[in-house]
Image (cartoon, rainbow, N blue to C red):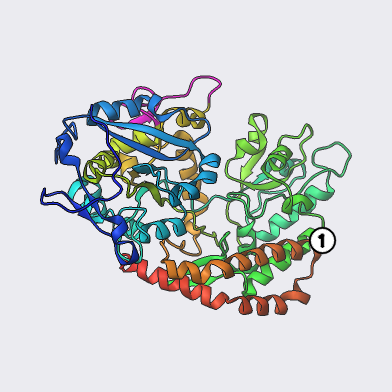
Amino acid sequence: MRHRSFLTTITVTATGALLLTGCGGGEAATQVEDASTEYGFRSEGLPIVDETLSLTFGGAKSALAPDYSDMELVQQWETDTNIAITWENLPDQVYQEKKSLMLAGDDLPDVLFNSGLTDAEVVQNGSNGTLVPLEGLIEEHAPTLSAILDERPDVRAAITASDGHIYTLPSVEELGILQYPNFLYINKTWLDTLGLPMPTTIEEYHEALEAFKTGDPNGNGKADEIPLSFRTDSFCANPWDLVAALGGQPENNDHRIVRDGKVEFTANTEEYKKGVSALADWHAEGLIDPESFSHDDVAYLAKGKSETPVLGSFFWWELKEMVGDDRVDDYAMLGILEGVDGKLASVTNNQEINRGAMAITRANQYPAATMRWADRLFEPVMSAQTNWGPIDVTLQEGENGILEQIPAEAGVSEGERRQLVAPGGPKIIQEKDFETVVAPEPRAAARQDLVAEHYAPFAANDAYPPVLLSNEELEQISFPQTDITALVKEKFASWIANGTIDAEWDGYVSQLDSMGIDDVTGVYQQAYDRFQQGGE
């Protein structure tokens, strides 16, 4: 076995080696002489190299995951490709603490796998030469990924920086469920006890919450019922659909939506004011859990499992997780209620196309072999295994030839098992692949059905796409965006709790103007337009 060695200076020779260059100030730093041919590099077929090539990978991993080298799937990769990887992936929190120093130093791994890079870090480390531009490597050595990018210009645009380079490989899983994370549930047992119908309008829902507060539906003679609870700024417990129903303003955590190709800031409109003002009235009536703005996930989830049932209605990703097995049948999904402007489902900006799954660093002397190694992960069957685990361990072929989940053994959840056997990283599982290659997990399939029935038909906006902002754009929005987000979050909570929105609204709008909200929205519009042009 040959072992790779680091070279502090790499020069161009007449050997036919590949030369990769960046642009601007990073050009000298990204010159790489590809030495893959020294190991008997093959342009197609397996193994990828005749002599074993050793590479070092770093990045993040789940705290539950073993060393990747102990995973059956990863061991099979080495056998198939003849590329031996020394894995230096760290638990995510540890990796995040060490990442900046690693990127700024000279002791870089050859590859960042599950890179954990923010958009700003991708742009910065791409332009300064720490990350190698990948578009030429993809074109020459990644036929599977190249074909997908030709078919899917939106995926190409999502991973293309404003300078035209691709610095990281994507991770895509198109289940169509992330855009609607805030499911609204209600205690139907309490409705039956109080003789109330299942609400279909925002007015009927308000009446049900009033009855929950005053009618003692849990029958213990105490006023301990919580009519409505939620969490703000969480992934899946936000009351944005109520803001839309009460005021007519589609909303999400970013306070940024797209309608008819126009990027809109949501939290300074009259419709937003109307929706928040109505929630303040509900709070004054005692219908909203006063801890909605302070409790964490642990405290929030405990309310659904209290010894005496106290929770009337709530937002969360999954019913069973909130209320437990014993109370699942006591609750029903409400979905989108008829409001002041019809049924409006707020679409979030949660992305199914993600960048940062893998990057090649300037330390890597074998980018051609590395890219061929990565391209295998984009084959649909391999992407399924990368995401859920190997065939005959977590996946099996069903009667229709499609891969299906093998039920986890007792005492182990599918999520826990997945972290033990699936390394993640680059993958593309398109919507069509869930019909011909791999079936969604049962929980995901159930959620797809709920989204299709209760949410997707009423989508009130488009999501802001996975745009990679330029260095200049990031610099323009960085500070004002932080201040704007903090102000909106603070006022949303205080206005509902204190009912002061009318007195403070004009000053709030003026403050947003002085913070540069129009300029920030303009930057997002500019980046959106570029994305619509394919990232050019």
The image shows residue 483 at horizontal and vertical percentages of: 63, 67
Regarding residue 121, the answer to whether it shows in the image is yes
The image shows residue 217 at horizontal and vertical percentages of: 80, 41
In this view, the residue in front, 45 or 406, is: 45
The image shows residue 53 at horizontal and vertical percentages of: 24, 33
In this view, the residue in front, 532 or 146, is: 146
Residue furthest to the right in view is: 221
516 inside magenta stretch:
no
In the rendered view, does 378 fall on the left or right side of 448? left
Identify which amino acid the numbered label 1 is placed on: Ala
Q: Quarter of the image containing the N terminus?
A: top left
Q: Quadrant of residue 253?
A: bottom right
Q: Quadrant of residue 82?
A: top left
398 inside magenta stretch:
yes
Residue tagged 1 = 284
Regarding residue 437, the answer to whether it shows in the image is no
In the rendered view, does 219 fall on the left or right side of 508? right
The image shows residue 303 at horizontal and vertical percentages of: 73, 40
36 vs 166: above or below: above
In the image, the segment drawn in magenta is 389-412
Q: Residue at x 45, y 31 (%)?
A: 418
Q: Quadrant of residue 328?
A: top right
In this view, the residue in front, 421 or 199, is: 421
262 vs 420: above or below: below
Q: Residue at x 51, y 44 (%)?
A: 98
Q: Secondary structure at mark 1?
A: helix
Residue furthest to the front in view is: 8
| Disc 1 residue crowd, few under 14, some 14–19, many 20+, Cα 10 Å | some
